[in-house]
Amino acid sequence: MGYSFNPYDRVSYAPLLEALSQTADRKLILISPQAGEVLKRISTEHPELRVRAVEKTFREWAADSFRLS
């Protein structure tokens, strides 16, 4: 799912993260040049989630064969 997780949009993405926090896997992977900043905020707001950051543009991530490391 593509989403920027802008703090001003919290009302629209909070239900998605709440639903994810109820799943067995509870994993959220953020792909964005600002992923580290977003990870800190979401990890604080939803400590039950396992959040991972890939600090790349989508294009850079695709060129890197969509690797998560």
Image: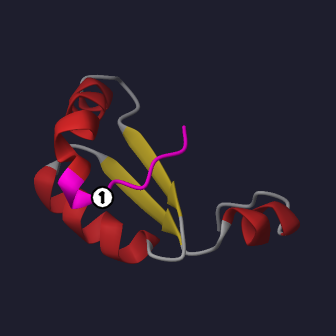
> With respect to residue 18, does 47 lie above or below?
below
Specify start and end residues of the magenta stretch as a single range: 1-8
Helix, strand or loop at label 1? It is: loop
- Dividing the picture into quadrants, the one containing residue 17 is top left
Q: Residue furthest left?
A: 45
- Predominant SS of the magenta segment: loop
Question: How many dots with numbers?
Answer: 1
Q: Residues within 10 Å of mark 1 (few under 14, many from 20)?
A: few
Q: Is residue 4 magenta?
A: yes
Q: Residue furthest front?
A: 8
Residue at the image point whose x is 30% and y is 30% from the top: 16
Q: Position of residue 65 (x, y in %)?
A: 85, 60
> With respect to residue 29, does 25 lie above or below?
above
Residue at the image point whose x is 44% and y is 70% from the top: 35
- Dividing the picture into quadrants, the one containing residue 55 is bottom right
Tell whether 58 sits left or right of 29. Answer: right
Q: Position of residue 12 (x, y in %)?
A: 25, 35
> With respect to residue 19, does 2 lie above or below?
below
Give the position of the C terminus as an image quadrant: bottom right
- Colour convention: secondary structure
Tell whether 56 sits left or right of 34. Answer: right
Give the position of the N terminus as an image quadrant: top right
Q: Position of residue 27 (x, y in %)?
A: 41, 42
Look at mark 1 in the image and give the residue it sits on.
6
Residue at the image point whose x is 39% and y is 75% from the top: 36
**Amino acid type of the residue tagged 1 in the rendering:** Asn
- Dividing the picture into quadrants, the one containing residue 52 is bottom left
